[in-house]
Amino acid sequence: MTERLFQRDSYLKTFDARVTAVRPEGVRLDRTAFFPTGGGVLGDTGTLTGPSGLSRVVETVEDEGGVLHRLERAGLAVDDAVQGELEWARRYLLMRYHTATHVLTGVMFNDFHVRVTGNQLTPDKGRVDFAFEQFDRDVLEEGFRRANAIVAQDLAVRVSFVPAARARAQAELFKLETAFRHDLPELRLVEIVGFDTQADGGCHVATLSEIGRLVLAKTENKGKANRRVYFVLE
Ligand SMILES: [Zn+2]
């Protein structure tokens, strides 16, 4: 298993690790700060530097043994020591979009009982699918206003780990269902203090003011009740 350093410290930009497997799809490390694609959030890019020099990490994905880093060029072998470095500007944007999605989906559910059914976050936009009973543009715009009001409160974001069995009993922790494994003894909780708590394995900013401002970009009709909502951060 790869130790997921980003789950304890989402601001970790460089790290030392050891290669534990070399596959055609990429190399697995004993520990990593690279977030693997999951829960609707793109995985990290960056570089790994080993005995034979530097290679770009073009994609990070999950595999059954942990986290795989797909490299631009081959050359690493099992047991090589490597230094990893994230493409930080890109990752930080993903952290901002991801945390913004918590706020928006929390507001839509808490205030309007509108559930989220999926999301897709990239460094330049957020996409969230909402299941409306009946789509109402005014409700959505009010949701964005309230989300921005909560961001303006600059609430802290805290991470904790709890026994999985205890967390499983609380359905409200699983609204987003992003990027956590279901087979671990502990679940990771991400709390926006005073607002919402979710079971979540992803990377978030430390305080809400880092998000900036959510701006509704467009909506698409995805069936009777489903609306695909795009937003950008300013
Ligand atoms: Zn999250």
Image (cartoon, rainbow, N blue to C red):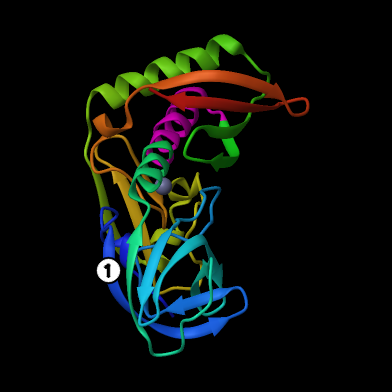
Asked if residue 30 is positioned above or below residue 32 in the image, the reply reads below
Please indicate whether residue 130 sits to the left or right of residue 103 in the image. Answer: right
Task: From the top left corner, tell me how far across and down residue 123 is, in percent.
Answer: 47, 39
Nearer to us in this view, 141 or 19: 19
Secondary structure of the residue carrying numbered label 1: strand
- Whether residue 185 is in magenta: the answer is no
Question: Which quadrant of the rendered structure holds the N terminus?
Answer: bottom left
Task: From the top left corner, tell me how far across and down residue 159 is, in percent.
Answer: 27, 54
Task: From the top left corner, tell me how far across and down residue 82 is, in percent.
Answer: 34, 77
Asked if residue 212 is positioned above or below residue 142 in the image, the reply reads below
State which quadrant residue 85 falls in.
bottom left
- The residue that appears at 38% across and 18% down in the rendered structure is 146
- Whether residue 113 is in magenta: the answer is yes
Residue furthest toward the right? 223
Question: Which secondary structure type mostly characterizes the magenta part of the structure?
Answer: helix
Please indicate whether residue 27 sits to the left or right of residue 118 in the image. Answer: left
Question: Which quadrant of the rendered structure holds the C terminus?
Answer: top left
Asked if residue 193 is positioned above or below residue 217 in the image, the reply reads below
The residue pinned by badge 1 equals 15
State which quadrant residue 135 falls in.
top right
Nearer to us in this view, 82 or 97: 82
Q: Total label count?
A: 1
The amino acid marked with disc number 1 is Phe
The part of the chain drawn in magenta is 98-114
Please indicate whether residue 127 sits to the left or right of residue 185 in the image. Answer: right
- The residue that appears at 51% across and 19% down in the rendered structure is 216
Residue furthest toward the bottom? 79
- The residue that appears at 43% across and 27% down in the rendered structure is 107
